[in-house]
């Protein structure tokens, strides 16, 4: 009899341990999903370990002192994850103070998660496999057998059934089920496959990554310096050594362009993993990787868990992006995982960005990372000139005169324009003109978003919606719909430039499958004159004919109440400016602002990131902010507000009374979202120096409160955003 140690699907600190179940079969079930009874309910579990016993069920129950259950069913034919990834999961569970099961779940595509979900099964089609050459075959039989022999396996639908059956009868081939993979579309535009030779700087960067004895290199390269080409050449190098490569990009939209570049070389040994694939496609890409058919994976955050063997290189492009940190349990940082996997596999990590995060900068300064620079654009093209427009002097609230003229000029010259709608720091909310009331969701305490199409207010946290009718405070029917969204700008642009072809790119318009790919191709093929988009158009894309970039509303970022506001604003600006003038024609960037004397804007104009970093680091040091201290949030949620508040106060006192040095607790305070679905939230903020020591404190704090089921505790270590 086998005794299996099983973790249960619920991500709950109280259940973050193994439960023993019995199993009569002999086969190895470690790493497989099982269906078991837990608390009278059928749930999915994941087998962490097994042992054998000669005792009977009754004898074992005697020994345990309670009743034991058998496993109902083993779900998988093979282990879901390998030893390495199990190790990664344990590391995450420790580092992010999260239940192990949550870490296992985040690593796997939905259909393979140890969790009760409906989902697609593996799809098989009938086919034939070659066995031997046989004797006395007809000409046609010999022809078909030759064909199958060459391919090893063929689908039944591709061959003549009569002849194939005859071959089966003669024992030359046999019927098999062939696993069908839904393939992800990647552009096969020939333009992406051109052969390029690295320039001197790129070659130096390449050599430096190969030759350094440091685990991790930081490639700081200005926009258009050809970082992607360095990644590509490195990927080929490791691939040709028989090692596999993961390349992470921050936005789905970037996968399409870089995948197109990689596809020409790696062909079917390339897989994509990102959230706009269908569940079926994700599953299939995952299976192809796990089967060893894939050597190079391109994807967004969770692709860091791709089950590649012989990992040689992990590249993280635009490494400063917030999207690399997950904001729900387990709140992991992709860079941590990358370094962990690289250590495990003796592989290398390459972080790339025009504006690395201050955390990475300081590690490079200290010599922990190998710092590499690409200081000029390919072929010494100039970085775009930056113009600051003082909106205090403008009549039009949104479009300055200068911008209007410049757009017209570009339209005349048949060049392209990108208009960035910076969405950080606000959402399109509705305000009563008469009394100033702001429409908010009563469940969630966040402003509701206004949707013009159906004249409705919608809460994007809990999903509730209602028709915009009268002000509940004063009864007035006149509203200010503030916070201009990309849709409104799109309308205005279309009104101003009737002849222009305008494309809006934001989360709404790019939802459809493959729409990213389509849009990127449309812009590259000059089927679009003006692109109006959110942050997603700012990053990494390479459009040769864009010569003007305009940033309409950077002020909300510059003034955000977040210690990272300046760093973020700088990074965003450099990224979006970098979209202009990437080919022969020179680029120009226009930033509209009400704060023209802001330091960040001045420094952006000079493109001196080191100078900016030094100033910013001095400020962080003075204020004891990261990277000089760590920050963690202890997020507390519960139904009864006064009880929650009392608990928060007591928790703070508990932490203070530990008398730890360099460990300060602030709060309690309200997070941005102080209520979700009727559940109140409060946060404590902890600033600390020693990560290991503090993780231990957080763990003990959670354990001490395990029995309290009225308050839920979530620990978020070094998040990318305030909560
Ligand atoms: P980055 O990622 O640094 O912003 P890209 O990798 O997108 O820059 O490269 C910018 C442009 O320069 C691309 O169009 C690319 O094809 C081109 N390019 C890159 N390296 C070379 C090279 N060695 N020779 C010629 N063109 C290059
Ligand atoms: Zn009102
Ligand atoms: Zn709500």
Image (cartoon, rainbow, N blue to C red):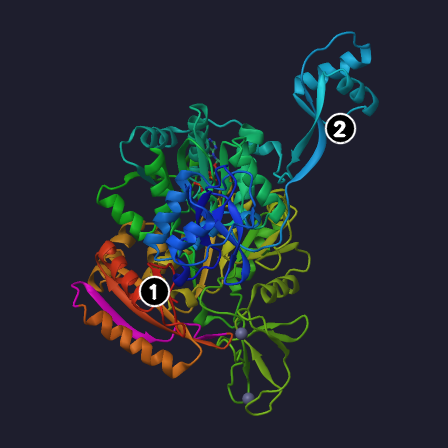
Location of residue 347 with respect to 319 vertically, above or below: above
Q: Describe residue 213's horizontal placement relative to residue 524 as left or right.
A: left
Instruction: Write down the region rendered in magenta.
Output: 659-676
Quarter of the image with the C terminus in it: bottom left
Does any portion of residue 90 appear in the rendered image? Answer: yes
The residue tagged 1 is 598
Disc 1, SS: loop
In which quarter of the view is residue 598 placed? bottom left
Q: Is residue 663 magenta?
A: yes
x then y, percent, for residue 721: 39, 62
Find out if the beta carbon at label 2 lies less than 8 Å from the nearest ligand 1 atom: no
Checking the image for residue 156, the label placed there is 2
486 is higher (above) or lower (below) than 503: below
Report which quarter residue 623 is drawn in.
bottom left
Circle nearer the N terminus (2, 1): 2
Q: Quadrant of ligand 2?
A: bottom right
Residue at horizontal 25%, vertical 49%?
362
Q: Nearer the viewer, residue 519 or 700?
A: 700
Q: Residue at image x 44%, y 67%?
A: 425
- Which residue is the extreme one toward the right? 162
Whether residue 577 appears in this view of the structure is no
Q: Position of residue 23 (x, y in %)?
A: 50, 45
Q: Is residue 149 left or right of residue 632?
A: right
Tell me which residue sits at (52%, 47%) in the image: 33
x, y (%) of residue 7?
Answer: 44, 53
Q: In the image, is residue 293 above or below residue 681? A: above
Label 2 residue SS: helix
């Amino acid at each position: 009899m086998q005794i299996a140690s099983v973790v249960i699907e619920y991500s709950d600190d109280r259940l973050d341990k193994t439960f023993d179940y019995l199993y009569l079969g002999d086969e190895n079930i470690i790493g497989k999903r099982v269906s078991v009874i837990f608390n009278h309910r059928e749930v999915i579990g994941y087998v962490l370990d097994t042992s054998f016993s000669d005792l009977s069920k009754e004898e074992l129950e005697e020994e345990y002192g309670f009743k034991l259950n058998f496993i109902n069913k083993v779900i998988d034919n093979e282990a879901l994850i390998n030893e390495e990834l199990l190790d990664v999961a344990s590391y995450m569970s420790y580092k992010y103070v999260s239940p192990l099961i949550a870490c296992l779940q985040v690593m796997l595509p939905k259909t393979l998660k140890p969790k009760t979900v409906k989902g697609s099964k593996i799809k098989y089609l009938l086919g034939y496999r070659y066995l031997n050459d046989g004797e006395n075959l007809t000409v046609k039989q010999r022809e078909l057998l030759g064909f199958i022999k060459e391919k090893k396996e063929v689908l039944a639908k591709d061959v003549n059934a009569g002849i194939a059956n005859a071959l089966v009868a003669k024992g030359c081939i046999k019927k098999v089920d062939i696993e069908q993979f839904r393939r992800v579309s990647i552009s096969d535009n020939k333009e992406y496959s051109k052969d390029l030779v690295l320039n001197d700087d790129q070659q130096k960067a390449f050599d430096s990554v190969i030759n350094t004895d440091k685990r991790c290199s930081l490639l700081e390269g200005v926009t258009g310096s050809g970082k992607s080409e360095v990644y590509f050449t490195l990927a080929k190098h490791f691939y040709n050594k028989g090692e596999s490569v993961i390349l992470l990009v921050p936005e789905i939209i970037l996968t399409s362009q870089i995948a197109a570049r990689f596809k020409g070389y790696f062909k079917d040994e390339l897989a994509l993993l990102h959230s706009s694939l269908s569940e079926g496609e994700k599953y299939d890409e995952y299976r192809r990787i796990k089967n060893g058919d894939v050597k190079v994976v391109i994807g967004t955050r969770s692709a860091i868990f791709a089950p590649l063997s012989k990992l040689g290189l992990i590249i993280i492009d635009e490494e400063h992006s917030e999207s690399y940190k997950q904001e729900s349990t387990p709140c992991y940082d992709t860079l941590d995982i990358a370094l962990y996997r690289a250590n495990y596999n003796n592989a290398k990590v390459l972080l790339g960005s025009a504006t690395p995060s201050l955390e990475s900068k300081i590690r490079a300064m200290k010599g922990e990372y190998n710092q590499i620079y690409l200081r000029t654009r390919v072929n010494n093209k100039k970085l775009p000139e930056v113009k600051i427009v003082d909106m205090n002097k403008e009549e039009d609230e949104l479009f300055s005169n200068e911008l209007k003229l410049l757009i017209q000029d570009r339209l005349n010259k048949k060049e392209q324009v990108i208009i960035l709608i910076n969405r950080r720091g606000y959402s399109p909310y509705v305000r009563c003109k008469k009394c100033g009331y702001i429409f908010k969701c009563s469940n969630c305490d966040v402003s509701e978003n206004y949707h013009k199409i159906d004249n409705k207010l919608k809460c994007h946290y809990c999903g509730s919606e209602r028709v915009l009718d009268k002000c509940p405070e004063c009864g007035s029917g006149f509203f200010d719909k503030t916070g201009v969204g990309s849709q409104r700008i799109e309308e205005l642009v279309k009104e101003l430039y009737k002849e222009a072809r305008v494309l809006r790119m934001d989360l709404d318009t790019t939802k459809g499958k493959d729409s990213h790919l389509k849009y990127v191709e449309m812009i590259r093929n000059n089927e679009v004159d003006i692109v109006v988009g959110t942050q997603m158009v700012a990053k990494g894309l390479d459009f040769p004919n864009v010569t003007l970039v305009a940033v309409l509303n950077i002020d909300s970022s510059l003034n955000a109440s977040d210690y990272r506001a300046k760093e973020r604003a700088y990074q965003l600006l450099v990224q979006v400016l970098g979209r202009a003038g990437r080919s022969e024609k020179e680029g120009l960037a226009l930033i509209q602002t009400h704060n023209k004397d802001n330091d960040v804007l001045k420094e952006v104009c000079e493109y001196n990131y080191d100078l900016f970093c030094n100033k910013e680091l001095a400020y962080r040091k003075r204020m004891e902010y990261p990277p000089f201290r760590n920050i963690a949030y202890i997020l507390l949620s519960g139904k009864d507000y006064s009880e929650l508040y009392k608990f928060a106060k007591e928790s703070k006192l508990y932490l203070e009374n530990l008398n730890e040095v360099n460990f300060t607790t602030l709060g309690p305070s309200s997070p941005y979202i102080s209520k979700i679905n009727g559940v109140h939230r409060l946060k404590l903020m902890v600033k600390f120096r020693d990560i290991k020591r503090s993780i231990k404190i957080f763990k003990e704090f959670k354990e001490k409160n395990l029995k309290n089921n009225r308050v839920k505790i979530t620990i978020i270590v070094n998040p990318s955003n305030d909560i």
